[in-house]
Amino acid sequence: MTAMQFQPSADFARQLDEQDELSAFRHRFVIDDPNLIYLDGNSLGRLPRRAADRLAQAVHQEWGRRLIRGWNDGWMDLPSRLGAKIAALVGARPDEVLVADSTSVNLFKLAVAALRARPNRRKIVSDVFNFPSDLYIFQGIIDLLNQGHRLELIPSSDGVSIEPADIRAAIDEETALVSLTHVAFKSAFRYDMAQVNAWARQAGALTLWDLSHSVGAVPLRLNEWGADMAVGCTYKYLNGGPGAPAFLYVRRDLQADLRQPIWGWLGADRPFDFSLTYTPGDSIHRFRVGTPPVLSMVAIEAGLEILLEAGIDRVWAKSARQTEYLIYLFDQRLAGLGFSLGSPRSPACRGSHVSLRHPDAYRITQAMIQAAPGPQVVPDFRTPDNIRLGIAPLYTTYTDIYRAINRIETIVTERLYEAYPAIPQGVT
Ligand SMILES: *Cc1c(COP(=O)(O)O)cnc(C)c1O
């Protein structure tokens, strides 16, 4: 796909929508405000219609009527049943993925386990693009273990990408763990995961990937690419609902070597023996901690089923085309207005969102969300100057993208953003 194939007109956007083989999936989601253009599926995915139905059933039938018997009717298996569905999306075996806890907590569990599995090494390699929670978790682990571990962050020279040579240079014989976010949350830069895994393996280090901005958006082949461990969110491109539990992946032949540090009863070998001494379960079960949040887990399944039905390769093909279309419109309409592109141009090095940088980015996002008349556009703002536009191909249309770029152009050329305060407040 080259930019030559696009045209900057509303008619052309409509044509692209008419040709879109995934367009019917949009109707699987609750979308009832035609004036709202939602480009934040990378932070909180939309509500699948079936998720609302399943949730109502779980509340009224299962909790309301079955009560405690619900645990044996399927509640207890939710972490592994949903894990197996996520495994199918990320190129892993069904017994290598589990739904549990939050992304941050899973990262803690696996990072501690990894450092203890490499006791003679002291270095954790990450990068300056990583999500702050991930870096805080590593800093907290270093503080907790108090064994002289250190965190080394791979730099970026342009704020958009990371150079392969810099990754290679950071991974050495001292490295216990390489932990990176596969698709960077600000710039959408995407690593060549297989290459990084190969470098880590050669050096004897373990890898732990954060897939929060990848899963459900870009193809993943964790087994084939040799990933040791991974974590990720279910409330972004998986459409699992606000604060939905996260997932973790541990390569099968590594599971027995890893001891995670939170020894809860449901990670134990036989929880219902109520033994007074902890013995870790075998298999992926040892990475569980406590009672699963059933209602939140029930809400995840419908979104996973939609993605599996659509097929991640088709979802990604549409995402690549939509983000290229967005960048084409950016070049045509916004490039002269003080913006710069904050994401890689090539889809091969990018995830499913595009960051536009502008000195007045925060005020522009406020105007996009609040200004009337005209459509409301929901992006998100990432400090200091990023307007993030998330493409969720299951429900984002080409017309959405066309209208959003138009709206941004109007806001900037008519200086509508000047009506909004420059200081960020609340959740951005
Ligand atoms: C969204 C996100 C998280 C969120 O972690 P929680 O524990 O769910 O708050 C973590 N890492 C990355 C890379 C994210 O994008």
Image: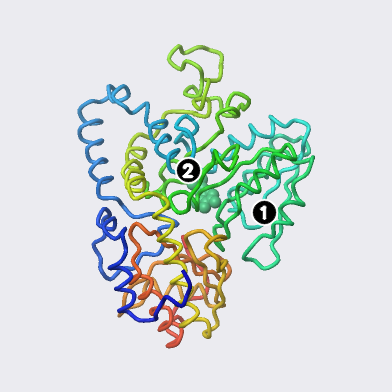
Give the image quarter of residue 32.
Answer: bottom left
Q: Earlier in the sequence, mark 1 or mark 2?
A: 2
Q: Colour scheme in the image?
A: rainbow
Q: Amino acid at mark 2?
A: Val
Check contact, mark 1 vs mark 2: CB within 8 A: no
Q: Where does the image place residue 126, in percent across and percent down from the top left?
A: 67, 49
Label 1 sits on residue: 127
- Counting every numbered tag in the picture gives 2
Q: Disc 2 on helix, strand or loop?
A: helix
Which is more foreground, mark 1 or mark 2?
2
User: Would you call the spot at circle 1 few (<14 residues within 10 Å), some (14-19), or many (20 or more)?
Assistant: many
Q: Disc 1 on helix, strand or loop?
A: strand
Q: Where does the image place residue 75, in percent across and percent down from the top left?
A: 33, 28
Q: Amino acid at mark 1?
A: Asp
State the residue in front, 212 or 415: 212
Label 2 sits on residue: 90
At a point 35% along the width and 63% down the height, the residue shown is 396
> Real-space Cα distance between discs 1 and 2?
23 Å
Respond yes or no on whether mark 1 lies under 8 Å from ligand 1: no
At a point 56% along the width and 63% down the height, the residue shown is 187
The numbered disc on residue 193 is none
Above or below — where is 359 with respect to 248? below
At a point 20% along the width and 32% down the height, the residue shown is 61
Q: Where does the image place residue 20, in percent across and percent down from the top left?
A: 32, 63
Residue 227 lies left or right of residue 269; in this view the side is right
Q: Where does the image place residue 417, in percent across and percent down from the top left?
A: 45, 80
State the residue in front, 349 or 179: 349
User: Would you call the spot at circle 2 few (<14 residues within 10 Å), some (14-19), or many (20 or more)?
Assistant: many
